[in-house]
Image: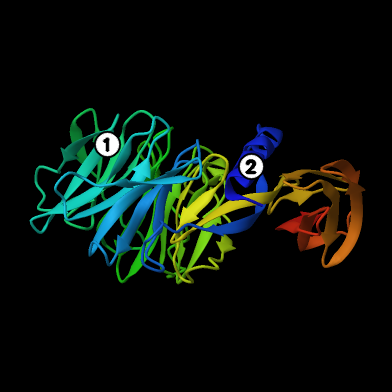
């Protein structure tokens, strides 16, 4: 199936699953397609950002020019983005209005740029020797980094520096910012002690991807309007769906579940951006949802009384054959089609492995694995 056709089907499927409530557990199966700028060196094309019209921006390298160039990919066609006179241009983010941000190199120094209506403007942090812009939203708010690692927000002509709070007594040395969504939530990676932590910031509140006791290297690279986040976890990629849906008091809110991703084109290259249709871009690839499963009841880690209300919906590029319910590795219920809404008597027990899985007509399976207690 061609890339453009698959993207059109994704937009249609998005309409079918719109309006899913908070506390939803989500699983998505992706189809990967390579992104290679024509004539670029092998494995040199990096897709860094995508907007809600599925327009992609990034960078590529060619021996012919001995230089790195930015690019835009829209409606099946590539075009080059070069800051005038620069020796090096990288496009990192694109808004829904088509504004592009990134950075360029001139005389050995890095400078941020905004391309608006085809015209380039340099945007440099006033106290910096190097500036890189990394993301922009529909309102024109920009995030970026100066001197390679110190994050900032640029809004209405004003720079505001940001550094994540310390955790577990460890200092935060710096915080790099990587993306921002239309509601204004931005994401990044904080260097704390000797490991990295993914963060997202909503207003005055900073949240972390994992508990401070995990000590795994992770980072947050992109966020969409659903508050889905993509990024790196150790040496691989992940997506975390609707991270704001579990928000509450700091002492009770839950850390998001991470769905690991595999890049078949460049192993170890992490996803960089995600749009509202949940299309993901990263190093040399685009990943398009082909099957999405949302489970709204029961809630993960909840305590429930029989009969338990089980509610789920599934949609994809192929018809949905069945939604199944499994408890502790045994199937206990299934229904034909893409909607499940039933009260089911489940085996009683604590911290049971509760699985809902959708199967489409091609045998593709999307699976949500939760833990519940049933009385």
**15 or 60, which lies in front?**
60
Q: Residue at x 84, y 60 (%)?
A: 326
Q: Residue at x 84, y 55 (%)?
A: 325
Which residue position is annotated with label 1?
115
What is the CA distance from the residue labelled 1 to the residue labelled 2?
28 Å
Colour theme: rainbow
Give the side of residue 208 with respect to residue 308, left or right. Answer: left
How far across and how far down the image is residue 355, in percent?
77, 58
The image quadrant that residue 20 belongs to is: top right
How far across and how far down the image is residue 161, in percent?
21, 44
State the count of labels. 2
Q: Is there any visible trace of residue 178 in the rendered image?
A: no
The image quadrant that residue 21 belongs to is: top right
**65 or 13, which lies in front?**
65
Q: Residue at x 90, y 52 (%)?
A: 334
Determine which of the numbered discs, if any, sits on residue 10 in the image: 2
How far across and how far down the image is residue 17, in percent?
69, 37
Circle 1 residues within 10 Å: few <14, some 14–19, many ≥20:
some
What secondary structure is found at the residue carrying circle 1?
strand
The image quadrant that residue 352 belongs to is: bottom right
What secondary structure is found at the residue carrying circle 2?
helix
């Amino acid at each position: 199936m061609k890339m453009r056709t698959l993207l059109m089907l994704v937009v249609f499927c998005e309409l079918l699953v719109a309006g899913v409530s908070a506390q939803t557990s989500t699983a998505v199966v992706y189809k990967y397609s390579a992104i290679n700028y024509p004539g670029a060196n092998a494995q040199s094309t990096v897709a860094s950002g995508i907007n809600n019209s599925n327009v992609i921006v990034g960078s590529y390298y060619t021996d012919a020019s001995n230089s790195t160039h930015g690019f835009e990919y829209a409606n099946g066609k590539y075009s080059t983005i070069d800051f005038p006179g620069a020796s090096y241009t990288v496009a990192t983010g694109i808004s829904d209005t088509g504004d592009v941000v990134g950075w360029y190199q001139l005389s050995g120094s890095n400078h941020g740029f905004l391309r608006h209506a085809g015209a380039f403007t340099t945007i440099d942090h006033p106290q910096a020797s190097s500036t890189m812009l990394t993301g922009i939203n529909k309102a024109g708010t920009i995030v970026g980094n100066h001197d390679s690692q110190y994050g900032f927000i640029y809004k209405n002509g004003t720079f505001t520096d940001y550094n994540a709070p310390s955790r577990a007594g460890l200092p935060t040395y710096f915080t790099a910012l990587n993306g921002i969504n239309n509601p204004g939530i931005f994401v990044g990676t904080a260097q704390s002690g000797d490991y990295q932590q993914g963060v997202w910031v909503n207003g005055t509140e900073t949240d972390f991807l994992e508990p401070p006791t995990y000590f795994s290297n992770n980072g947050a690279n992109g966020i969409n309007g659903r508050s889905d986040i993509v990024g790196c976890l150790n040496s691989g990629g992940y997506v975390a769906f609707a991270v704001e849906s579990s928000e509450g008091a700091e002492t009770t809110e839950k850390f998001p579940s991470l769905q690991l991703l595999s890049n078949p084109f460049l192993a170890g290259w992490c996803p960089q951006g995600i749009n509202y249709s949940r299309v993901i871009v990263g190093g040399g690839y685009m990943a398009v949802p082909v099957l999405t499963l949302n489970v709204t009841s029961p809630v993960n880690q909840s305590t429930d009384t029989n009969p338990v209300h089980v509610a789920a919906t599934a949609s994809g590029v192929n018809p949905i054959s069945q939604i199944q319910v499994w408890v502790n590795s045994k199937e206990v219920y299934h229904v034909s089609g893409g909607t499940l809404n039933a009260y089911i008597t489940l085996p009683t027990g604590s911290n049971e492995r509760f699985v809902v899985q959708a199967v489409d007509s091609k045998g593709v399976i999307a699976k949500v694995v939760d833990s519940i207690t049933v009385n």
